[in-house]
Image: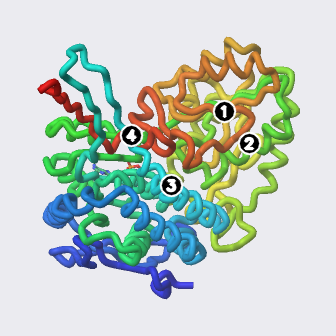
Amino acid sequence: MKITDFKLYRDKCFINGQWINADSSEIISVNNPATLEEIGTVPKCGKNETKLAIEAANKSWPEWRAKSAKDRSVILKKWYELIIDNKEELAQMMTLEQGKPINESRGEIVYGASFIEWFAEEAKRIYGDTIPDPLTDRRILVIKQPVGVVASITPWNFPNAMITRKCAPALAVGCPVVIKPASQTPYSALALAALAEEAGFPKGTLNVITGKASEIGDELASNSLVRKLSFTGSTEIGKILLQKCAGTVKKVSMELGGHAPFIVFDDANIDDAVIGAIQSKFRNTGQTCVCANRIYAQDGIYDEFCQKFVQATSELKVGDGLNEETTSGPMIDEYSLEKVEEHVQDAIQLGAKIAIGGSKHSLGMNFYQPTILTDVTPEAKITSEETFGPVAPVYRFKDENEVISLANNSPFGLASYFYSRDIGRIWRVSEALEYGMVGVNTGLTSKAEAPFGGIKESGLGREGSKYGVDDFLEVKYVNMCGLDK
Ligand code: ADP
């Protein structure tokens, strides 16, 4: 199956309701990470086209914000339905450009669409306040209004859902958007734009621009018409964008790196913990910011947990994501693979043992074996850096206080997980973990109804849930005076 055969395949940018090439006619090539073959090209746009997209978005803003929440909701719901109707095609396109197993792609399409459905409803509930004024002839009124043009820069690991999670709340409350998808996975973004066009968004309300990340990113971060930048990606790039946004004092949301601890206490249900560890560690071949990066197993269950975890890992099927049997696809590119190799070699040199895996997969190219390392030392890079690959380091710990301090010893604070059946411990540990999200007896926590986000260097802001609209709204205070006349 060629991606060019799909009816939602678009190889142009979507700006101001038109499908356009780069001014320079330059292109970037997009590859299938499972075969390394070129599957197509997209325009290599830069500063000028980005300005055009921002100006188009700004021009569309008065019309879009003037619609009632219900009218915007109707268009969003239409978009949602079109995505669900085209789920299979969108999933296949995603696997071709991203590599993830087709079943995970199907899951992501439904998960991604759920944000549109959620925010289509939520936008009708943007409530304000009335506050008693200290003077009797006055009233204080608080209303919430859309911030304006929203720029959204998204990564390749969730090519669909990271876009919908940002754009659905923005659009729902009345903000137009300019989307810059990752260069590895532009087709999922362009297919979403094609469906948005069909759903009936006014022209300029939703724009997708592909091309040189730094040039497009610079313009999005420095252009004063952009009032909010929402970024998901590495902490390194997030910090650069934060600095650039300071120039025009934009609102920002940052979903950055993580280094999730995954703790299994002696009183846990071990079989459940193994299922959770597999889901949390190996989903998307370990390439999610909420992946378990450090697995802490308590003394009493350490051996049993490791043995069962290794057994479950040995059952994973590595291969091309288009194969229905595959549970672990390729890594996105050779650089990601190199980082995984570096982390594994470094850990081994410092004393870690390979319980399973430990090297490239015999399929070659970007495939790496699902790997478990035991006896990993605190000095190993993998103990403090995000691996973003299919490697699970397991550490032994003695008691609750020790593991909480180990878990919190990180500049990151995105997701964390632990397994326990003790209600007192569940409260204590949930409150003690310095993370934006805590999964208790689960390895998967993301859903449209819940606030996704991190603390410390993992980011700013929350996506999803009733809190997910806040970042796209300004609070305006109106003081009504002279009411006694
Ligand atoms: P990763 O590729 O590890 O997910 P990145 O932070 O490199 O993380 O990329 C996330 C998104 O940020 C992608 O869309 C990428 O194109 C974009 N990006 C990369 N470098 C820059 C930059 N200098 N300015 C703006 N965006 C960037």
Q: Residue 430: image x %, image y %?
A: 64, 23
Question: In the image, what residue occupies the spot 25% across and 78% down?
Answer: 18
Q: Secondary structure at mark 4?
A: loop
Near-viewer residue (45 or 227): 227
Q: Which mark is residue 115?
A: 3
User: Between disc 2 and disc 1, whose residue precedes?
Assistant: 2
Residue 466 appears in the rendering: yes
| Label pair 1/4, CB-CB below 8 angstroms | no
Q: Using residue 235 as the reference point, say whether residue 118 is left or right of it.
A: right
Question: In the image, what residue occupies the spot 45% across and 69% down?
Answer: 79
Q: Disc 4 to disc 3, how far (Cα)?
A: 20 Å
Quadrant placement of the N terminus: bottom right
Q: Report the mark closest to the observer, 1 or 3.
A: 3
For label 4, the residue is 127
Q: Residues within 10 Å of mark 2 (few under 14, many from 20)?
A: many
Near-viewer residue (385 or 68): 68
